[in-house]
Amino acid sequence: MKVRLPLSILLLILSGCTWHSTGISQPPVAPQTTAPHFDVKEGKYDPPVDLYTVGSVNPNLNFIQGESLEHNVHTVWAENRLGIRIRYLWTISGTSETYANKLRLELAKGNLPDIVTTRDAAVIQELIDSGQFMEVGDLFEQHASEVWKRAVAEDASAWNPFVRSGHKYAIPIMDYEYNSDPLLWVRQDWLDKLKLEAPQTLDELEQVMDAFVNRDPDGNGLKDTYGLSVGFRNGPSTWMGDSSWIFGAFGTVPEQWNRRSDGTLEYGSVQPGARKAVQLMKQWVQHGYLTADSAWLDEEGAANQFITGKAGIIAGPYWMRGWPLSSLTQSDPQARVRAVAIPAGPGGLIMRRGTLPVNGAILINKKMKHPEIFFTYQNYLFDSYATSTGEFTHGLAEGYDWAMTGGEPTDQSSALPLGGIRVASYTLTFDGARIPSEVIREIPKDIVPVLLSQKEASRKEQFTGPPTATMKRDGELLKKLEQKSFQKIIFADSGVEEFDEFVAKWNAYGGLTETAEVNAWDSSHR
């Protein structure tokens, strides 16, 4: 849950943050006073121009010795290839919440760079509402490349959250389709040892989980394993350690607005199917199929339970095989992990959280005199990296995310420093550039039929507009009420009847008004 903190508290917190710096002195931000000269023949600005931004150094970033977010193979490339010097006013180490709160602090001071990019939906709305960022719809039409325009056009709702009075105030950062849709990752070696088949229904899943708990699948003679690893700290619908599919087995996807058969929108977490899901999960905790500690595990905590051999099943996206599940197979060569489809609930019902192909937004400061500089940068990434052509056919940087071995290109970790360095994380939009429909090139071939066989089960968020008035006023209270209620029912001593109390409070504290506002917005956009 994203936390909005008062400015006085932010100052105290940020004074104790770890600041990341290369020791390279960055010049103070100053607007480009003369029109930049773009040398068409060379395809770059000459002389070079500065592009100011800010960044978060999260724990998953890795660098070779001597490099940092401020100075690395990608920033060197941008200057050499495009004549664009990427300058960081500041970078901050820590969680996404740390970065979000730092942005809020600088926003209050009016001290933000040319370009701000963030995945945090709440912060994006605050930045837009501040009035410090320019309308970008016309800029995008004028300067974006055709490849970039087509990528955004693949999702008709991509712009919706960033529109105010018909004008666009942030550019959506596109992601792949199905990029965080969950499937089940199962310890195939445990199944084989216990002579079990991969579960196809919830009933079969319970049999497998019971065996994983009670029949010593790891052979250490101790009853110290769980059936399923879940991360519930950030709610049931999440990118790793997900449990939305359990709710989906009963006809609803939690923490989002779903479309009813009559065409109207309803909030998934307050539906009768959600009551059945939390009741079932409570039973699984009582049977020891999942640990009560799941209430406080985040996504990586849930993954850690699986990769340390303490759980035999986890739900998460197709890319988990590369990270973090490879840690399990590296530490235990006998371990085998297999992707299987989401099991069906009563009556064969299957639903899972669907991926909206938008992963944040780009905001352009009104003080930026020449925003076309940013478009030059991002257009190149879309035209080359998103399409895997030209110098980016194999990756962003040879010797970092790909290498030549025996005359052939490879991205195998064994051939790369630090097991491979994700240079795309150094780009201003976190992933370089992505075209939603190009996901098929990214999914391992053996996982394609598993993930795409259940395309109809993928249920995306249906409310894609900016926050309603009630969401702004009461949204945080309603989310906290939901999270606390679910945690108490599933993992603590509360009975399932508390779900009915939660729904009544949700309705009374603003949920009914939210529902009316959401449907009013939906009616005006169909």
Image: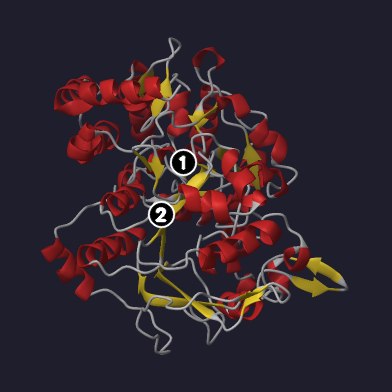
Q: Which residue was labeled with disc 1? A: 159
CA neighbours of label 1 inside 10 A, class few (<14), some (14 to 19), many (20+): many
Give residue 145's position: percent from left, percent from top. 63, 54
Give residue 115's position: percent from left, percent from top. 42, 64
Q: Tell me the amino acid under the disc marked 2.
A: Gly
Q: At 40% across and 85% down in the image, what residue appears?
A: 26
Q: At 61% across and 58% down in the image, what residue appears?
A: 326
Task: Please determine whether, in this image, residue 93 is positioned above or below residue 187.
Answer: below
Q: Which mark is residue 301?
A: 2
Give residue 129's position: percent from left, percent from top. 27, 49
Visible residue check, residue 309: no
Q: Decide which of 349, 28 is in the foreground and name it.
A: 28
Q: Tell me the amino acid under the disc marked 1.
A: Trp
Check the image and name the residue furthest to the top.
262
- Left/right placement of residue 241 relative to residue 125 reads right
Check the image and name the residue furthest to the left.
8
